[in-house]
Amino acid sequence: MPGTLLAADLQITDARIRLLPGDIPAAGYFTLTNTGETGTTLIGADSSAFDNVTIHQSVSQDGISSMQHVEQLTVAAGELVELAPGGYHLMLMKRKHPIAVGDEIEVTLLLDNGQQQNVKFRAGAPTTQ
């Protein structure tokens, strides 16, 4: 169907979570590739392992670095967006149970067209890039 994004048109690779000690929020990184003929927009995420998952962007302004909440992240047709340290990422807040390095955590990505994409993220150490 031209103009319709199918689940097969959206590829998620290198999904990983950087765990920090205690209840400090974790960061989720991955590459989102849209091989379809129309753009798609990531509008949120959810995980049974965390109370809250949101999209953030690291920004630097006047020499001061901060994180800002992002309502949505659009990936144009034929393009990719990398969620990585220093840029866009998922913030995974308030773990519901202990998570160890090496564990696989399922995260559901929510798209503006109503589709959901379940992704397995590998939990990594605080040095995970």
Image (tube, grey):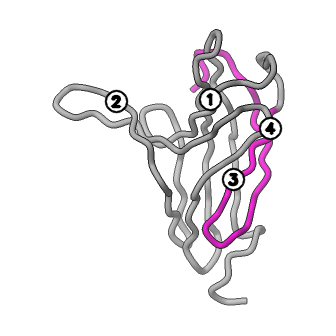
Q: Quadrant of the N terminus?
A: bottom right
Name the residue furthest top.
21
Instruction: Specify which label sits upstream in the sequence, 2 or 1.
Output: 2
Magenta region: which residues? 105-129
Structural distance between the alpha carbons of marks 3 and 1: 15 Å
The x and y percentages for residue 27 are: 58, 30
Q: Is residue 61 magenta?
A: no
Instruction: Specify which label sits upstream in the sequence, 4 or 2.
Output: 4
Which of the 4 image quarters holds residue 94? top right
Q: Which residue is mark 3?
A: 109
Structural distance between the alpha carbons of marks 2 and 3: 24 Å
The x and y percentages for residue 64 are: 24, 26
Q: Which residue is mark 2?
A: 66
Would you call the spot at circle 1 few (<14 residues within 10 Å), some (14-19), or many (20 or more)? some
Structural distance between the alpha carbons of marks 4 and 1: 11 Å
> Looking at the rendered structure, which numbered label has been put on residue 93?
1
- The type of residue carrying mark 3 is Leu
Structural distance between the alpha carbons of marks 4 and 2: 27 Å
Q: Which residue is mark 4?
A: 48
| Element on which disc 4 rests | loop
